Image (cartoon, helix red, strand yellow):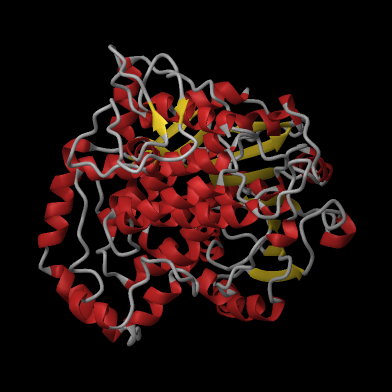
Amino acid sequence: MRIFLQEIVKIWAQDHGYTEIPKLAINSHPPKQPTTCSTKFPKEIKQSPMESMMNNGWLTLPTFENPSQDSAIRQFCPARVEQEQGGEWGEMLLDENIEIWPHFINEQPQLAPSEAEDFVDSFFNVECYEKDNAVKSSEGGENEAFDQFQEDGLQDLSIMIDDVYYGSNDPTVIEGDELEGCNGVENVITIGVDQGLQLVHFLLACAEAVGCRDARLASSILTEIWPCVSPWGDSLQRVSHCFAMGLKSRLTLLQNVNPNGSFTNRAVDVSLITREEKNEAFNLLHQTTPYIAFGFMAANDAICQAASGKDNLHIIDLGMEHNLQWPSLVRNLASRIEGPPKIIKITGIIGDQDPLELENSTKGLCEEASSLGISLEFRFVPEQVTTLSLTREKLDLREKETLFVNSIMHLHTHVKESRGSLKTILQSVKKLNPVLLTVVEQDANHNGPFFLGRFLESLHYYSAVFDSLDASLPRSSPQRIKIEKFHLAEEIINVVAYEGSDRIERHERADQWRRQLGRAGFHVVGLKCLNKAKLMLSGYGCDGYTVASEKGCLQLGWKGRPIMLASAWQVHNVPSSS
């Protein structure tokens, strides 16, 4: 017990910036009259469970003369986390079938004061946060948006609210009479800078407790978090709500940890979100933000340039789930100076998607292509993307076809701890000898071996995404609610809660993709659509989106934070068309 509490005190002391670890005096029973902790806390800030334990007499801490002003959130940054983790997939040799839950590492990376300030500013824009909240709370358009919300078919608001927790009994579920008084969104209290920073501290403290497998402490901190978060609040409250759900799900998994530190994946909860809901949310994300359209535009532009002068094109789409990418490609190819290609064949490896549904979605495009003088054919392979499905026979490759391989946010699902899966997929793609491989991925490090580092990086990343939605859609927008609940929340929960083969959202940074594709025998082909990307972003009416060219790749970001990566690659033995 003493060792356990000493570890908690060590965490607390490091979180609050103390340079030495306090000596711990443990009382076997709390005194009847609570004693006062020598460390003072601001009255306006609610005490954490750790602080409550101290003030109730369980723990006694001496006073330090020179406590550091750096808080827990200021002691981390993505660059330092990545440096601590080694930055190389190949440096950690873990079993692909069993993933060990890492113990909490007490040696936290320390930042210089200037680094700390930069990190806080990038995570939490103190200067604009309260101003933005005040503007959004006073916008008259909110009521109109909410009226439209009801007209769009969501007649029973409580159904969606209850569904946020998928039937759970958490205290943030709004039911019955509460809905009548709040009108869903208008009366949600937004939080200020101090409360926002405190909320981030709570999330980090809970993540640390979860990383220590301390379910009791983590659950206690979650009770502090629930009143502060809301799926209807400002962007910080909404993204924190999703991360709290992820922590709660991971706590459930902690109950199924094996003696050797691994856990039983059978214990992972099955998502109650339907495929139709996921597809709808993806379509809405495509319509309302540039993140998906940016990837389509960059990939299609690279294909059009590589297809110059070619009349028989065959595109292999890895993990195809929809038909959103192809209308613009067909129209761009039809407008070529030398005339449209005669044949375009698109083969989608669709996994467990419904081939009939996909086929029906392509009929209109096939008719349009025919009117433009193009013979467009879709073919679907109802298998997962494996070495067995990536063969010339399975894909029906033919002579005189100009072959392309397209991957839109799919290759990261093959990144595993042992890296073997991605390597074999890339080797299989290389054997097909395509003229071009297009890759679009989330530009983030969500595959670190340590849970706490992965949690912090993903919190930083998705906070930027939620902030961009806040600038584009009102809080009461049904489109925004569906995007956040059916798409973004699912990704966050997968990153935070799951391990082993169940964790499929293993996003990587641009440098990692360059390294892995280079090792597999590909070299980057510089994308030439930067101006097109800038023109596309200007149509969204938001100043926060940024696009830049980095080592031949295009990066789309929000307020300087990279969000999406688009790139094109050729096999080394294929000469570049440029």
User: Where in the figure is residue 443, as x and y percent of width and height?
Assistant: 51, 40
Q: Residue at x 29, y 24 (%)?
A: 117
* Residue found farthest to the top: 65
User: Where in the figure is residue 277, as x and y percent of width and height?
Assistant: 51, 74
Left or right side of 551 for 343 = right
| Whether residue 508 is situated above or below residue 246 in the rendered picture | above
Residue 379 quadrant? bottom right
Left or right side of 399 for 84 = left
Residue 541 quadrant? bottom left
Count of residue discs: 0
Q: Residue at x 26, y 44 (%)?
A: 46
Residue 576 quadrant? top right
- For residue 445, say whether it is visible: no
* Residue found farthest to the front: 32
Left or right side of 488 for 545 = left
User: Where in the figure is residue 261, as x and y percent of width and height?
Assistant: 73, 41
Who is closer to the viewer here, 157 or 103?
Answer: 103
User: Where in the figure is residue 383, as x and y percent of width and height?
Assistant: 79, 65
Q: Quadrant of the C terminus?
A: top right
- For residue 48, say whether it is visible: yes
Q: Residue at x 76, y 33 (%)?
A: 520
Left or right side of 50 for 374 = right
Who is closer to the viewer here, 332 or 412?
Answer: 412
| Whether residue 134 is situated above or below residue 321 in the rendered picture | above
